[in-house]
Amino acid sequence: MKRTGSQIFVESLKAEGVDTIFCYPGGATLNITDALTDISNIRQIVVRHEQGAVHAADGYARALGRPGVALVTSGPGATNTVTGIATACMDSIPIVVFSCQVNTMLIGNDAFQEADIVGITRPCTKHSYLVRDVKDLARIIKEAFHIASSGRPGPVLVDIPKDVSSAVCDFKYPEKVHIRSYQPTYVGHQGQIKKAMRLILHSKRPVLYTGGGVVLSNASQELTRFAEALSIPVTNTLMGLGGIPGNHPLFLGMLGMHGTYAANMAITESDLIIAMGARFDDRATGKTDEFAPHAKIIHVDIDPTSISKNIKVDIPIVGDTRNVLTQMLKIIDEDKETYRQHHKNVAEWTGKITRWKKDYPLTYQKNKELKPQYVIERVFGLTKGKAIITTEVGQNQMWTAQFFKFLKPRTCLTSGGLGTMGYGFPAAIGAQAAFPKSLVIDIAGDGSIQMNIQELATAVQYNLPVKVIILNNGFLGMVRQWQELFYEKRYTWTHLHSPDFVKVAEAYGAVGLRIEKESEVDKILKEAFRNNRPTFVDVHVSPKECVYPMVPAGASLKEMLLV
Amino acid sequence: MKHTISLLVENEFGVLSRIAGLFSGRGFNIESLCVAESLDPTISTMTIVTTGNDAILEQILKQLNKLINVIKVVDFKDIEYVSREMVLVKVNAEEKTRAEILRIVEIFRGKIVDVSSKTYTVMITGDEDKLSAFINLIRPLGIKELVRTGPIAMARGERMLKIKETENKGGEEDG
């Protein structure tokens, strides 16, 4: 059947089950834009800035577990996606970004709105394609979705020149993908797994250190079962939050720079770290020389490059976290009694950890001021954890990680690796598009929200009723905190003038609410959660609150500054 | 420490820049890089000489394997292999030095591939040590220009760099 490139594009998206795309038109998209006219089973959400489109696709993918799709025009449209792509790449999020390109004949001529986007994004994509012949288009789209969502997931960019989208050829969507140079390892090596299980049985102070890989491979049930079967305490990275319920007795909270006392001390005193789908990022490990100095390390990860990159590992296991946990659980099930005995070995350890949790809980100084931590506690209290939470980056992100107890995976959407301010709001729009009936809340700061505030128009236009809670302290709080602690309180560049967010919201046709006192928090939050419209809640919080505990940059995890 | 790595990669445009970009982006060194089509025209063979300690080499190999267009990576660290390089040297050829140049070239089994009234262009092949020894000998006679290819390498004996259709390049199997 003869089809144009644009029709092939539309048919291929349908074949991949794509129901939503986040897009922005331009000269080079016109063929494809036109082909999408009246295609009602692909929802087309036109954003206000291409960065927003990619973050929205990313939020959609994180919340739903299926690849998100963005479509943008050539030149500036394409370059505006770079931050979004790099964000998804660092956090291993499956998205496919289609950029349109100038005509094939013009490529390399510095044509109007031409940019070498394949070249520009090469270091921050999992893979990328320039489609030079319409005959390759269907195969490339098939491969792009496959590569984005398999192995260690990540962003794939497909650059489609305008003449390719108008050229005609026979179309049949390929049923299978075969890439001879790409076959990720999913099943863990049985010998390595047996070795790991022996090591676990001999451990007295084991800790599970789990990351985004658990969420990405949908392994949270297996992880929880595994931890319970062996009575091993669990700490999460920021990316791993929700991988085990935040209120689980074995859960220690997040580790690292703003991790809990219990988590950081458990790592420091542990004799066996079982790392699952985590990559020993510097914000999690602190000073690597002093990370878990007494521990052997088992590391399960689907990406071999993550293993022994920052910290030398004793037992590497390459594989999908969920598969490996399932393989491990099978070994436990075959010898239940032995493993139940293990609870005795670790009883002293779990007792010690319980005391740490009790003696050094996450807390803050309660006084007459309205504290940001209190606001997040109330967001959790009022929603009972039944919400999809996105964050921006900085103090708002760390307080959310500390004080919102994520009960389920895929409910904490945050830019962990790249730390992208401006991520949370468009990501919330993406998550809301994936789950129209869920309560989706972006916890923002007055700095971050202004990095993609234009997407409020998108939320209003498509009636995506996301709630943005702006913890407004008049500062770029996290940088200000470092200035307070390490730069003798010289608050250079960090004091912010912001607009009246209530009026901004109203001007966009959204709802604007304000909280100035602790006594208003419940009432106004309830009002925000109840209405079915996009809503900004401008919360005037105490301006100089700091995030604690804090491990100073370059220090070891046990050197925490407490409240 | 120096390492020689061989790669089989898809013979497509953009692959070289992915590999070069990987080295520069992650701060790895490239001492030399040779690339050309292999016996199978859909595949190119690359030989890269790099430097770094064992941990860095391990990362280089893993990161190369992770690139979608890379089919196979072999490190010659623990493999017997032959490695050859070619150099072209344009050397001053004055009346009194010509005989000396010819003698050195003969000893090294090189060839004079171009002659002018004032220069000889010499081609020598061999391993790195041989080429360096030749260059050191000829240097006092006046080298005007020098171009080296960088080494290409191949395992000794029956061992071959080839792909299996079910190539599994990710697994750690030291269990």
Image (tube, rainbow, N blue to C red):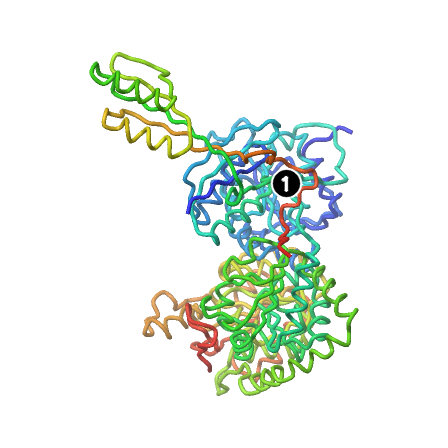
Q: Residue at x 74, y 43 (%)?
A: A39
Residue A298 visible to the viewer: yes
Q: Nearer the viewer, residue A398 or B169?
A: B169
Q: Is residue A548 above or below residue A498?
A: below
Which residue extends farthest left? Answer: B96
Residue A295: x, y in percent? 54, 71
Task: Using the rendered view, name the quadrant where residue B133 is placed.
Answer: top left
Residue B146: x, y in percent? 33, 27
Q: Nearer the viewer, residue A421 or B139?
A: B139
Residue that carries the numbered disc 1 in the rendered image: A181
Label 1 SS: loop
Which quadrant does the N terminus of chain A fall into? top right
Q: Is residue B120 left or right of residue A279?
A: left
Q: How many marks?
A: 1
Residue A199: x, y in percent? 64, 69
Q: Chain of mark 1?
A: A
Q: Is residue A438 above or below residue B50?
A: below
Q: Nearer the viewer, residue A487 or A153?
A: A153
Q: Is residue A221 left or right of residue A22?
A: right
Residue A190: x, y in percent? 71, 58
Q: Is residue A199 above or below residue A368?
A: above
Residue A432 visible to the viewer: no
Q: Is residue A470 left or right of residue A555?
A: right
Q: Residue at x 59, y 79 (%)?
A: A377
Q: Within 10 Å of the Cα at label 1, are there few (<14), some (14-19), or many (20+) other Cα atoms?
A: many
Which residue extends farthest top? Answer: B117
Q: Residue at x 60, y 36 (%)?
A: B159
Label 1 is placed on what type of residue? Ser
Task: Using the rendered view, name the quadrant where residue A505 is placed.
Answer: bottom right
